[in-house]
Image: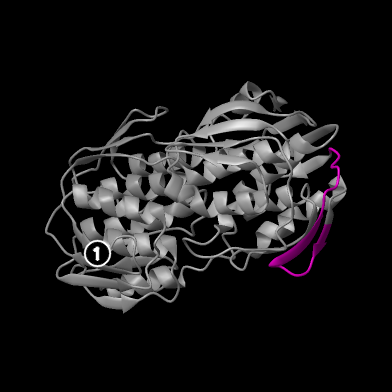
Amino acid sequence: MSVLRVQGGRRLEGAVTVEGNKNAALPLIVASLLTTEAVTLHNVPRISDVDVLLDLLAGLGSSIEGRGTSTLVLRAAARPGSMPDAHLVGRVRASMLLMGPLLARVGEVHLAPPGGDFPSRRTLSTHVQALTALGARAIEGEAHAFDAPEGLRGASFYLDEASVTATELALLAAVTASGETEIRHAATEPHVVELCQLLVAMGAQIDGAGTSRVRVHGVSHLHGATHTLRGDYIEAGTWAVIAAVTRGAIDVRGAQPEDLEPIVSVLQRMQVPCDVDDDRVRISAGPCVALGRLVTGLWPAFPSDMVSLFTVLATQAQGRTLIHDWMYELRLFALEQLSGMRADIFLCDSHRMVVTGPTPLRGRHLDTRDLRSGMALIAAALAAEGESVVGPLETVERGYAHVVERLTALGAVVSREG
């Protein structure tokens, strides 16, 4: 395992162009299993979660061109395997999406428990609900094994929660199911819309993408297609917060303004100097005031994936902020480490934290327990006086490409060790 050694207290300045949306790339890669023709994806992020998922596809018989680049050409086997590699499945949560195409193409799937952040705290009940509604049947004695001996069939159902991955799984399973499917209480995030766009380009018939009610008219087969991923708005928001927390000035390019709006809105409420145009957001040095209250929500509300970074920003804002992330309790627990950096924080419970600022941070050893809080702790280390050691760095590299090189280009004094 590697660590990132950070000499903090330096203003970061320059420009960053974000890569494709991580949360879109993974389901789009999985969608390639629905056809034997080539699926070409451009602007794919060069992150470790993508590498793990490509290894999974290769193990199922897919051919892959362009590994390590931003363009992938994927061709699924005539008959993919039905048992994805258990070790790899345990490394990436998006592996659960494999169940949809494998049930559609092969009629069965045997999946080990998916990994990723907070694997023991994130239930699959809504995903199972969608699959069983579409005609999948749990195989007795196996935790994540299903078959569909009579094929998948269209259905009308209401998701217990507006889960992104459950919505994506339902779409992947429904596009070639017989008959019509209606998914109510569907997730509406931009990456769900991107999946619909690719599936339609492959020949699927989908109405209502981006709304909470999506209709799918099953087709007998799909063909190849080409798609260019939108810029990752979570990555863009990350660099914006890093600029603000280090009192720097960074141009962040490549994300769509409409995707960034929930994040930029909060930055503007905090009076962070922020200028947005067609494909760029510029953060400049300036004052930062507390929000009073920041609550995560379903799209288009403030995204949970950004709450850790804004908690760090709140330590440098004038006043008090109540941070409330009702979705994932372990994110805030991971940020308790900020108190060892002299941050004034009070953990109310597993979902709420009160942050009072501004407080000067000091460097220390920090543990990256999940992807998003790990990047937030790197941001804290960059703002702190003195040296910090943050690791394992591999946790952050699941979702952020070339972290050391990009930070160095912005003027950070960082090095990778181990």
Query: Is residue 234 shown to the viewer in this render?
Result: yes
> Image height check: is 328 above or below 310?
below
Query: What is the x, y in percent for residue 189?
Result: 42, 57
Name the residue: 33% across, 50% down.
194
**Magenta stretch: residue 354 in it?**
yes
Quadrant in which the N terminus is drawn: top right
| Secondary structure type for disc 1 | helix
Q: Quadrant of the C terminus?
A: top right
Taking 173 as reference, is 190 left or right?
right
Residue drawn at x 73%, y 47% is: 288
Front residue of this view, candidates 100 and 112: 100
Quarter-of-image position of residue 50: top left
Query: Which span of residues is magenta-colored?
Result: 345-363
In the picture of the structure, the residue carrying the numbered disc 1 is 174
Q: Left or right of 325: which side holds 40? A: left
User: Residue 161, relative to residue 265: is it above or below?
Assistant: below
Residue 25 in picture, x, y percent from top left: 39, 44
Name the kind of residue labelled 1 in the image: Ala
Q: Write the residue at 33% across / 55% down.
A: 193
User: Picture quarter containing residue 286?
Assistant: top right
